[in-house]
């Protein structure tokens, strides 16, 4: 019995379960930003996310992955990596796949739905413009480059 308990404990310990309100919170964040006409700071962006009825982990997942999802759909011609690197608190670096990251999968589906229903240009810029990838592309384009010429590197997320 102890053996079975240890197997199941390890699996749930390694995988963080998202709350039932996670999806709704992602939608609410997008809707709230939709209603803001002016530029929002990083602090306000995080404040909008963290005041939702979600855990700190979930707020961080939205803060990290929502801009990436917006960027990937906004600049769909770019050659996006299917994986990203994550640096854990113990300094260990792990490679993970977006399609195996539950929070990203939920977020990307919500963002796809948003993009299919007359998205606000301002919201796309406010959210997608927060990604490091968009900032790097913007710099390249301002220097005369083309989106098709961009060679993406793996995103690194520091936990």
Image: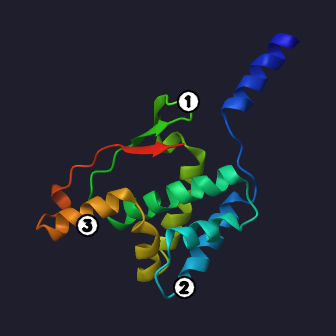
Element at label 2: loop
Task: Quadrant for the N terminus, please.
Answer: top right
Label 2 environment density (alpha carbons within 10 Å; few <14, some 14–19, many ≥20): few
Identified at 11% across, 68% down, the residue is: 144
Identified at 27% across, 57% down, the residue is: 78
- The residue labelled by disc 3 is 138
x and y percentages locating residue 113 in the rendered image: 52, 68
Residue 17 appears in the figure: yes
Rounded to the nearest whole Å, what is the CA distance between mark 1 and mark 3?
33 Å
Note whether 36 is above or below 76 in the view shown.
Answer: below
Element at label 3: helix
x and y percentages locating residue 35 in the rendered image: 57, 85
x and y percentages locating residue 116 in the rendered image: 47, 73
Sequence order check, earlier mark of 1 and 3: 1
| Residue depth check, mark 1 versus mark 3: number of the one nearer the observer | 1
Of residue 6 and residue 50, the one placed in the foreground of this image is: 50
Extreme residue toward the right, this view? 1
Rounded to the nearest whole Å, what is the CA distance between mark 2 and mark 3?
23 Å
Of residue 155 and residue 112, the one placed in the foreground of this image is: 155
Element at label 1: loop
Identified at 63% across, 66% down, the residue is: 49
Q: Can you tell which quarter of the image residue 142 is in? A: bottom left
Note whether 51 is above or below 82 in the view shown.
Answer: below
Note whether 72 is above or below 154 in the view shown.
Answer: below
Residue 108 appears in the figure: no
Q: Can you tell which quarter of the image residue 101 is in? A: top right
Q: Which mark is on residue 90?
A: 1
Q: Is residue 54 left or right of residue 79?
A: right
């Amino acid at each position: 019995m102890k053996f079975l308990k240890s197997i199941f404990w390890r699996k749930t310990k390694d995988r963080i379960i998202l709350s039932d309100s996670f999806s709704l919170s992602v939608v609410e964040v997008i809707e709230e930003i939709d209603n803001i006409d002016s530029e929002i700071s990083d602090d306000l962006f995080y404040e909008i996310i963290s005041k939702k009825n979600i855990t700190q982990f979930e707020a961080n997942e939205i803060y990290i992955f929502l801009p990436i999802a917006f960027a990937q759909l906004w600049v769909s011609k770019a050659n996006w990596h299917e994986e990203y690197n994550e640096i854990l608190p113990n300094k260990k670096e792990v490679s993970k796949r977006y399609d195996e990251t539950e929070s990203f999968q939920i977020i990307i589906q919500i963002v796809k739905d948003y993009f299919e229903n007359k998205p606000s240009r301002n919201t796309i810029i406010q959210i997608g413009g927060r990604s490091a990838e968009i900032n790097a592309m913007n710099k390249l384009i301002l220097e005369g480059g083309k989106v098709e010429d961009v060679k993406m590197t793996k995103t690194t997320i520091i936990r």
